[in-house]
Image: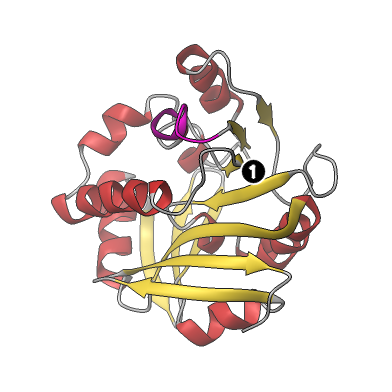
Amino acid sequence: MGDNNPFYQKSDWEVFYANFPEEILDYLEDEIEFYKGNVGASDIVLDAGCGTGRIMKELEGVVGEIHGIDISEGSVKRCKEILADCPLYVGTITDTPYRDSCFDTVLLSFNLLGNLNYEKEAAIREIKRILKLGGVVLLSVYSENALDIQEKIYRDLLGFDNVSSEGDYTFADTVNGEFISERFNWDKLRELFAGFSLELTENDFTYFGKAVSGVVK
């Protein structure tokens, strides 16, 4: 999945989010509060898939440092206009420029993990490398109950064609190829985060997760 996918070409996400259904807007607000409640004032944090800085601008000044990485050059450019003092990088979470053990916390927001598809294991390996021992991954993903809301977003808001679902996946056609998004259950997340202590909170169609590296529970 790359920057040529229309899902990642948007540079004005504020306008895009404004058209979301109320249940998604509520979820996005809850996501921010979840992150604020699980970061420390001295933490060095990476927002993976930072977009135009929706989360970064909420955590700037709350944590010690907030960094961002995103595959979309346009989104990162827009983010720099909003957050000029925050370190930003155009790239993928599967292969980052960061040194080993440099972050206290990595954020995986708005089902980023589910949109990585076949690269999600590689992303978690890279996150393990850049996290300090005892560092934390904070994530939000679509749960097994999210099928209807996923299809609504992709069909009605993104305008994708031929939206369909099978098993844990929703598929859609775009001008640049197939878009695939995954839903998760507790067992699948526990398997992905082997070697972490994983705590999950479930709401109507998402999980919020806190995974602590180097600690198994």
Q: Which residues are magenta?
A: 57-63
* Colour scheme employed for the rendering of this structure: secondary structure
Mark 1 nearby-residue class (10 Å; few <14, some 14–19, many ≥20): some
Q: Residue at x 68, y 30 (%)?
A: 90
Q: Can you give x and y, in whole percent of width and height, for residue 86 in the image?
A: 59, 22
Q: Residue at x 30, y 34 (%)?
A: 16
In this view, 186 is above or below 118: below
In this view, 154 is above or below 180: above
Q: Is residue 167 left or right of residue 193?
A: left
**At label 1, which amino acid type do we have?**
Gly
Q: Residue at x 43, y 74 (%)?
A: 200
* Quarter occupied by residue 116: bottom right
The C terminus appears in which quarter of the rendering?
bottom right
Q: Can you give x and y, in whole percent of width and height, for residue 145 in the image?
A: 30, 77
Total residue callouts = 1
Q: Residue furthest right?
A: 100
Q: Can you give x and y, in whole percent of width and height, for residue 31 in the image?
A: 35, 52
The foreground one among 7 and 160 is 7
Q: Can you give x and y, in whole percent of width and height, for residue 64 in the image?
A: 58, 32
* Mark 1 lies on residue: 2
Is 179 inside the magenta-drawn segment?
Answer: no
Q: Residue at x 36, y 62 (%)?
A: 163
* Quarter occupied by residue 87: top right
Q: Residue furthest left?
A: 22
The foreground one among 139 and 168 is 139
SS state under label 1? loop
